[in-house]
Amino acid sequence: MRLSRFPLTTLRETPADTEVVSHQLMVRAGMIRALASGLYTWMPLGLRVVRKVESAVREEMNRAGALELIMPAVQPAELWMESGRWEQYGPELLRLQDRHQREFCFGPTHEEVITDIARRELQSYRQLPVNYYQIQTKFRDEIRPRFGVMRAREFAMKDAYSFHMDADSLAETYEDMRLAYCRIFDRLGLEYRYVQADSGAIGGAVSHEFHVLADSGEDEIVYAENSDYAANVEQAPAPAPDISQHPAPTENLVHVDTPGQHSVEEVSAFLDVPLERVVKTLIVHAPDNSLVALILRGDHHLNAVKAARLEGVDAPLRFADAEEIKERLGCPVGSLGPVGLNIPCYVDAWAAVLSDFVCGGNTEGTHYTGVNWERNAALGTVCDLRNLEDGEPSPDGSGSVRSARGVEVGHIFQLGDKYSQAMDCTVLDPDGNKKTVIMGCYGIGITRIVAAAIEQNHDEHGIIWTDAMAPFRLLLCPIGFDRSDAVRDATEDLYRQCTESGIEVLLDDRGLRPGVMFAEADLIGIPHRIVISERGLDESQLEYQRRGSSEPEVLALDQFPDFLRDRLTSD
RNA sequence: CGGGGCAUGGCGCAGUCUGGUAGCGCACCUGCUUUGGGAGCAGGGGGUCGUGGGUUCAAAUCCCGCUGCCCCGACCA
């Protein structure tokens, strides 16, 4: 491709309405253009990257024996009523009516449609197992679309659905999919982790998430240094404290004045007590809207997902606001504590083993010191409320964990019979009896991978593509293309060699000043770059530079064919 | 959904308080010079100031309505 015929409108300045670096670079490089909130046009340069991701996914899905199909994006409400999700799904589901006032939705996912296909097509156990997939546009009416295509409303997703006679067969396909996903992310050259996403509390359902590691990721994950264990921090159990470390009380309860001291850090400093001997008291809503208290050690961080899973706590977690707390507990936030607190208390295990600790005095500007459970405050329910943190022991007993941030790009799930049961999807078994099939589902966010890859691989100049995702493999940068016959002739010859070798090559034949050409080259991130100049040609030399490496290499002109063969055709 | 902010040429912004001929940088077009990291000079094109109403001799600017977009909304308790 010649850049003179490939309009590339890059922006020198960062658009004001972009926040994360992938969004900024995608807009600046001309990969995407916004149409409305959460809706983007993929420009030719960006679409080439999307296609690379799609084809890696498609090839590995095919290799794993999955069958590609395409289902409609628009789905009739009747199917969603059968599964019960028409009521359940809420405002994220974009609902529409046709000219006859029939109800439809724009599919955010396709369990209902595929289950409908399966119950019509599949009659016999002989047809199982089977795994269907599609690469298709989804629409989810997100509360708050942001970060460009990372959290868009319309996005491309690969979704697969498998059907089985029994759990063993499902487990086999599930493992095949897990391996296929690993191959996909390996091929794309991304650093990733797969993490367990569910502890098994929900009916034995098994689920794993795949995360591309990036500092800006929306999820925090923890992984063991010495084993395969990895989990979303939302799910990872914190270690249990050593009960024997629970010393006997030595101090008396004292109600002290702490004027203006509200945060645990302030109180810790003011009273000269270590942060880990101060507890914080957080007030949230119960399902019936009454208040409950969550109590943690001052240096620990609340895990909202764990808290929301407690029976007496509403899910998702809803914090009580300051006015409500003042009104119902008679004390401003910042001075709350468990002593004499007249609402249900959930106490993190690490706070429960404290002795002689500090907490709020339940009156503005006061705290208690020398507090001891049961002696001064009812202990309430002891549970795991906090995050597992970097450096702590791994839940699988294999040493310590590290914490990292990740972008969720894949999710595989053993669904069981939730949809097949509701929608009566059955086949005949060898004995001629009707059996409800069980299902798995497997998603990959195609367009999100593009953003995640940029989050992971960029520098101050622009994007750094891996070979597998790059819109073009090689960029030819001739200096003086418009005014030097030698440069132009040599460049045209190299370009011809590339196209004949099947290399995806981009030629900057615009004759721009070198500074502009290089700045745009860095921005769009083509992994391999050859510079052709009169200066070099005088010595029969080219200059090669890998995007992201600081040192250019000299390449003899007559070695260019070897270069193509050795460095650019190996996948 | 709640709170805040913004809307002026393709992009980034000034002008709005205090009403009086719409401006700057980048980008774009033409010419000349320049050519190894987003050039210089000269000339040029492009804007119903988001939208609907109102006030006024006069509205980007003041008033009212609407729309769109962006940001914040889990830990001072």
Image (spheres, rainbow, N blue to C red):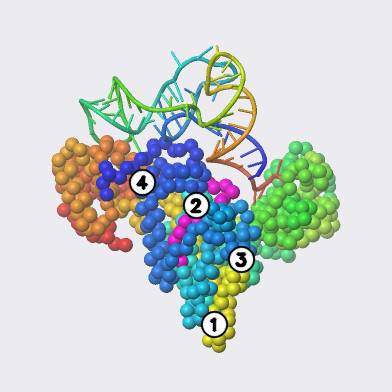
Callout 1: SS: strand
- Three-letter code, disc 2: Glu
Relative to the observer, which residue lies in front, A145 or A465? A145
Q: Which one is earlier in the sequence, the residue at label 2 or at label 1?
A: 2
The residue wearing badge 2 is A154
Q: Which one is earlier in the sequence, the residue at label 3 or at label 4?
A: 3
Relative to the observer, which residue lies in front, A241 or A553? A553
Q: Marks 1 and 4, Cα distance to the nearest angstrom? A: 55 Å
The residue wearing badge 1 is A428
Cβ–Cβ under 8 Å for marks 1 and 4: no
The residue wearing badge 3 is A83
Q: Are marks 2 and 3 on the same chain?
A: yes
- Three-letter code, disc 3: Ser
Residue lying at 54% horizontally and 72% vertically, measured from the top left? A439
Q: Which chain carries label 4?
A: A
Eye-nearest disc, 2 or 3: 3
Residue B15 vertical placement versus A352 (above, below) = above
> Does the stretch in magenta take in A434?
no
Q: Are marks 4 and 2 on the same chain?
A: yes
> Magenta span covers which residues?
A133-147
Q: In this view, does A209 lie to the left or right of A528?
A: right
Cβ–Cβ under 8 Å for marks 2 and 3: no
The residue wearing badge 4 is A524
Relative to the observer, which residue lies in front, A325 or A347? A325
Q: Mark 2 lies on which chain?
A: A
- Where does the image place residue A220, in percent across and percent down from the top left? 56, 55
Q: Which one is earlier in the sequence, the residue at label 3 or at label 1?
A: 3
Q: In this view, does A264 lie to the left or right of A496?
A: right
- Three-letter code, disc 4: Ile
Residue A229 vertical placement versus A150 (above, below) = below
- Three-letter code, disc 1: Leu
